Amino acid sequence: MLRMVTRGMPCLDYFSWFLVTIRNEKCGSNIVDMWDTSHPANTLNGSCMEYYNNTHGCAQPGTNGGYTVGPEDLYEEHKFVARVLSIIENHDPATPLFLNYDSHICHSPLQVPQEFFDKFGFINSSDVPDWDFHRHLYAAMVNYVDTAVGTIIEALKAKGMWENTLWVFQSDNGGPSFTGDNHTANNFPLKGAKYTNWEGGIRVNAFLSGPYLQQQAPAMIGQKLEGFVSICDYYATFARLAGQDPTDHRAALAGLPPIDSIDMWDYFTGKTTSSPRTEIFADHEVLLKGAYKLFVGHGTGDKHVACPSGDAACVSNGCWGGPYYPNASVATPACNAVETCKNGGCLYNIFADPEERVNLSEDPQHKVIVRETASNTLVFSSRTLDAHNTTHSDHPFANVLGYSLVVY
């Protein structure tokens, strides 16, 4: 297994099956828009949501009505895994397969089949007490994913496909430790959380595994890479493995910039020791370049935070969790800390200081880096489609998140 530190850009009710739920403001109701390949999938919606509590075999262990346990056959992830197994079973092993399995857990709301919930009752009597069954539920969800991965691998082996498989596991963002979904994650020792551009929000774990990696790069098994890798880079990397050109030629003819995806296969297989990616445009007010990350404005965080006159950046949710978090001593975790920086923005050396504790923007030795990085940020921003500038924030597709657990 090759472990990586990657950047999952901010690029569900689990006892139901759905693709998009749109709030219809005029009608004051929800529209469930579901599609399965070439036909409607509305029959797959529903089950242990809060209005099913105490019915259909569902139950609410804590005080949060949306956090439930129930029968596995009603569980959304169970349906996803069943579909993956069906695809593998019906696939011709002589034909290459790209299979993208987007697990919806571990994620809020905290919901899990009863039999997995029951495995972790010991958490409530541990030295670090739980809060409202949140760690209990979350641990059970992690166990469910682990079990699902094992089931899929066994299916690939039974089909004679595992020996030529590359498995890529990628998270999409850091956990929401104090930014909306209380007591569901811990990004310690990193700063910030989901919905932020601090390292706790965008620096995530990933790994490559499978016999194909063992065949192609046996020396990389068990190695750890810490150079920049963006979730966008899998496109160009997979295109190379499939023998395809990732270039968007129609976009090029229209004068549009090239895709922001870099082939990482030589880096993953050890043919080169450094990542070919040297910068990541994380958001229109955040740029990672070389060893540094620069925030300008609000760092695309809470724009309601008032900046003192003359400050170049006011970035919200600048907090750290503890090594034992969540726990029963914090009922409603929140972060009210705002990082205020002058002289061009907030600058951090994220390789020497991954916890982002030392702002370098006011250090005279870093003035040139601040100025050049701020200039680069403006260039990237001018070439990027920003959903916040093209639609209002209540638009149903203004904040679409992606999940990537990929089997190739």
Image (spheres, grey):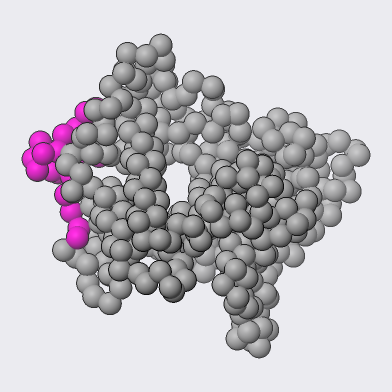
Name the residue at 70% across, 30% down.
357
Q: Main secondary structure of the magenta part?
A: loop
- Between 182 and 346, the one lying in front of the other is 182
Name the residue at 69% across, 35% down.
354
- Left or right, 368 with reference to 133: right
Residue 338 appears in view = yes
Q: Quadrant location of residue 375?
A: bottom right
The residue at the far right in this view is 365
Give the x, y percent position of residue 250: 60, 86
Quarter that holds the N terminus: top right
Give the x, y percent position of residue 204: 57, 44
- Left or right, 374 with reference to 332: right
Residue 287 appears in view = no
- Left or right, 224 with reference to 46: right
Give the x, y percent position of residue 277: 73, 58
Q: Is residue 62 magenta?
A: yes
Q: Quadrant location of residue 40?
A: bottom left
Name the residue at 13% across, 43% down.
52
Instruction: Answer above or below: position of 231 versus 335.
Output: below
Name the residue at 84% across, 54% down.
372
Instruction: Answer above or below: position of 223 versus 167.
Output: above
- Between 150 and 11, the one lying in front of the other is 150
Residue span colored magenta: 44-66
The residue at the far left in this view is 55
Instruction: Answer above or below: position of 64 versus 150.
Output: above
Q: Is residue 281 magenta?
A: no
Give the x, y percent position of residue 334: 47, 30
